[in-house]
Amino acid sequence: ESRLWTQVQLGHLYFNRGDLETAQAVYLAALAQRSDYIHAQAGLARIQAARGEYEAAIAAYEGITARLPLPQYIVELADLYEATGQGEKAAAQRELVHVIQQLNASAGMNVDLELAYFDVEYGDDPAAALQDVQAAYTERPTIYAADALAWALYKNGRFEEAQKYSEEALRLGTQDALLHFHAGVIAQALGDDADATVHFGRSQEINPYFSIRHSVK
């Protein structure tokens, strides 16, 4: 099990670099060892989505989430539903994510940042989500917490503050397409098209398939 898990993480690394072919080969190699290994199946579903094979990806994710309802996989299914005009199904899946994360929190798992970011991205109360992200950032001031705070501030129209935390998120030079995408959107909101173009370009260089939900503008 641990060897398969490590192998799938390697596949994720290739996917996050935009190398779909190598990622697919790694996931298939894992499945050759254990045909029902769900995390490798999810990796292949993510590749199908990246290639625009939405119908096949949805079918795969529906089977995966029925067996293992992890929030990450449910979110990806919800994004696919939204991308294919199935808004009610997307909303139902996102509500399920919220319930699962609340149950995880009740069980003692620290999901404050994950839940707060989810509310920033998908919720309808940006002010409340910002408060939750600020609390999570205070508790765990990681680069991803800084990115979440930047995005929450952006959603609340506080663009200059958002840029400050976006810069903090990028301070270590982490090669993450989403971090650069957020930085680009924030720069665009501030009217700095040159900086926005740099970040959008970097996002695409790192991984043009980083998100079903977002596309570079």
Image (spheres, grey):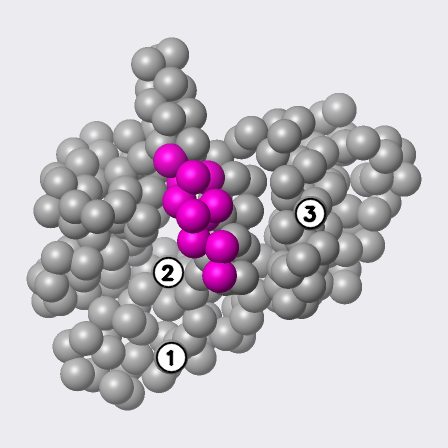
Residue matched to label 2: 179
- In the rendered structure, the answer to whether residue 37 lies left or right of residue 73 reads right
- In the rendered structure, the answer to whether residue 143 lies left or right of residue 45 reads left
Q: CA distance from mark 2 to mark 1?
A: 15 Å
Q: How would you rate the neighbour count of disc 3 (Cα within 10 Å): few for under 14, some for 14-19, many for 20 or more? A: few
The front one of 6 and 103 is 103
Which numbered disc covers residue 59?
Answer: 3
Q: For residue 193, say whether it is visible.
A: yes
Q: Are marks 3 and 2 in contact (CB under 8 Å)?
A: no
Q: Are marks 1 and 3 in contact (CB under 8 Å)?
A: no
The secondary structure that dominates the magenta segment is helix
Q: CA distance from mark 3 to mark 2?
A: 29 Å
Give the magenta-colored segment's residue range: 85-95
Residue matched to label 1: 217
Which numbered disc covers residue 199?
Answer: none
Q: How would you rate the neighbour count of disc 1 (Cα within 10 Å): few for under 14, some for 14-19, many for 20 or more? A: few
Q: Residue at x 18, y 36 (%)?
A: 132
Closer to viewer: mark 2 or mark 1? 1
